[in-house]
Image (tube, grey):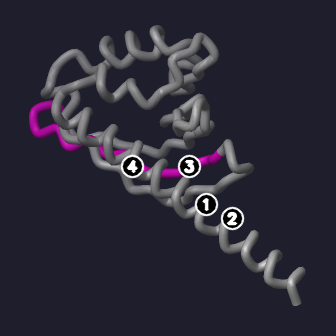
Amino acid sequence: MRKLFLIFAALTLTFTLAAQDKSAILDVLKRQENQWNSGNIEGFMEDYWKSPELKFIGKNGVTKGWEATKERYLRTYPDRATMGTLSFDIQEVDFHSDRAAWVLGKWALKRPEKGDTGGYFTLIFKKIENRWVIVSDHTS
């Protein structure tokens, strides 16, 4: 009976931690929406891994590194009219371990002056120094 209780306790703890981690990842995405919608690309980039190993994959190929990814965003979205209003629709969050997760979602930009746009993304998150950060972003 004690062994069964320990197994149950471990499963409960695992489920609770997974729920907390999922909530933390969803908080990252909500924070990114808010930063974007306030016109703050620098703030939007805070939840990306600040590393030369960061990868952004888009229709024009692979951008490597945090700084290059930030510069790509600044070039592609030079003003508020081009940035528009961002919304995410998260389809799936899948944990591959207690330190890695995969997120599938849709993104949409409402841009009255430039025309609306949107697409899909897959993000790979890693828990680095007890913080969930995006280490790979494939957006189309």
Q: Is residue 43 magenta?
A: no
Q: Nearer the viewer, residue 136 or 117?
A: 136
Give the image location of residue 92, x and y in percent: 55, 59
Q: Nearer the viewer, residue 119 or 133?
A: 133
Q: CA distance from mark 3 to mark 4?
A: 13 Å
Q: CA distance from mark 1 to mark 4?
A: 14 Å
Q: CA distance from mark 3 to mark 1?
A: 14 Å
Q: Which mark is residue 14?
A: 2
Question: Does the magenta stretch mainly form a helix, a strand or a loop?
Answer: strand
Q: CA distance from mark 2 to mark 4?
A: 20 Å
Give the image location of residue 107, x and y in percent: 38, 46
Q: Residues within 10 Å of mark 2 (few under 14, many from 20)?
A: few
Quadrant of the rendered image containing residue 123: top right
- On the image, numbered disc 3 is attached to which residue? 103
Q: Residue at x 41, y 43 (%)?
A: 28
- On the image, numbered disc 1 is attached to which residue? 18
Tell me whether circle 3 and circle 1 mark residues in contact (CB < 8 Å). Answer: no
Mark 1 or mark 4, earlier in chain = 1
Q: Amino acid at mark 3?
A: Val
- Mark 4 lies on a secondary structure that is helix
Q: Amino acid at mark 4?
A: Asp
Mark 3 or mark 4, earlier in chain = 4
Mark 2 or mark 3, earlier in chain = 2
- On the image, numbered disc 4 is attached to which residue? 27
Quadrant of the rendered image containing residue 61: top right
